[in-house]
Image: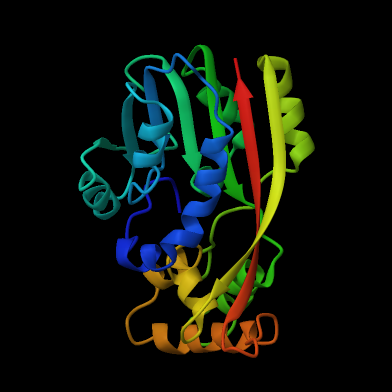
Amino acid sequence: MNGDREGWDPTQYLRFSDERLRPAIDLIARLDHPGAVQVVDLGCGAGNALPLLAVRFPGATISGVDGSAAMLARAAEAGFATHQADIARWAPPGPVDVLFSNAALHWLPDHAGLFPRLLGTLAPGGTLAVQMPAMHDAPLRALQDQIARQGRWAERLRGVSSAPPILPAGDYYNLLRPRVARLEMWFTEYVHVLQGADPVVQWAMGSSLRPYLDALDEAERPDFLAAYSEALRPHYSTQADGTVLLPFRRFFLLASM
């Protein structure tokens, strides 16, 4: 999947909107640009972070970019300017003061080329603010590939995968530190308290599981989801009160020119 995110379902994605928004809130709280005029949310999805960016940067022009028309339709309801574009190739019409991206850039390949290019879109003193899941080895993600290679759907899913692993933190440091005046990086592991039937599966259906589901026909999806759910169960057990805990690790990056 590229940055277009075609086939994404805003309703499914927003099923856990509070949990998905928490990292964006934490990243925005660390942003500091007193003179920001142009603020862009790259990969804005359903637009949840746009009002928060507007509060953080009063008076700035806030806009969102995403590849999914369905997601942008939901984002536009908040009254902010949005633009449909492949975020892997997007370029702004002019310099950007704050380029914000929450849980989007991990879908794109070639970060060694991508991140310097994004730095090139910034105005003097501008900031690139990024959050990406660091979950490639976690059962939530690893079992998707494993289940995809088994069963009657294996041939149909040949070559299908979810987001690639992000780089080690040291690689981002070596890539960005020589190009910026200030660089901050950190990891946070959230423990999401989920409820409902198969909530970890439902979480994945709103994001990382989309490439597999989009490649399957309607008759194959229930069996695929059942196999995935069965594989997940030993790793994400139900608590005494019926909830399921989902540890979710995320990588944060602030790079200022």
Q: Is residue 239 left or right of residue 72?
A: right
Q: Position of residue 174 (x, y in %)?
A: 76, 27
Placement of the C terminus among the 4 image quadrants: top right
Give the percent coordinates (x, y) of residue 33: 51, 20
Q: Compare residues 224 and 232 and report the one nearer the observer.
A: 232
Residue 5 position in % (x across, y down):
38, 52
Which colour assignment does the render follow?
A: rainbow
As drawn, 86 above or below 91: below
Residue at x 46%, y 19% (from the top left corner): 121
Residue plotted at (61% across, 36% down): 111
Residue drawn at x 50%, y 69% as measured from the top left: 204
> Residue at the top extreme?
124
The mark tally for this picture is 0
Residue 246 seen in the current view: yes
Residue lying farthest to the right in this orientation = 170
Q: Is residue 91 visible?
A: no
Quarter of the image where the N terminus is located? bottom left
* Residue at left offset 64%, top offset 35%: 253
Q: Quadrant of residue 173?
A: top right
* Position of 226 relative to 117 (above/below): below
Describe residue 6's horizontal placement relative to residue 184 as left or right: left
- In the displayed structure, would residue 250 be above or below residue 99? below
**Residue 60 x, y percent position in the rendering:** 34, 22
Q: Identify the image quadrant of residue 149.
A: bottom right
As drawn, 67 above or below 244: above
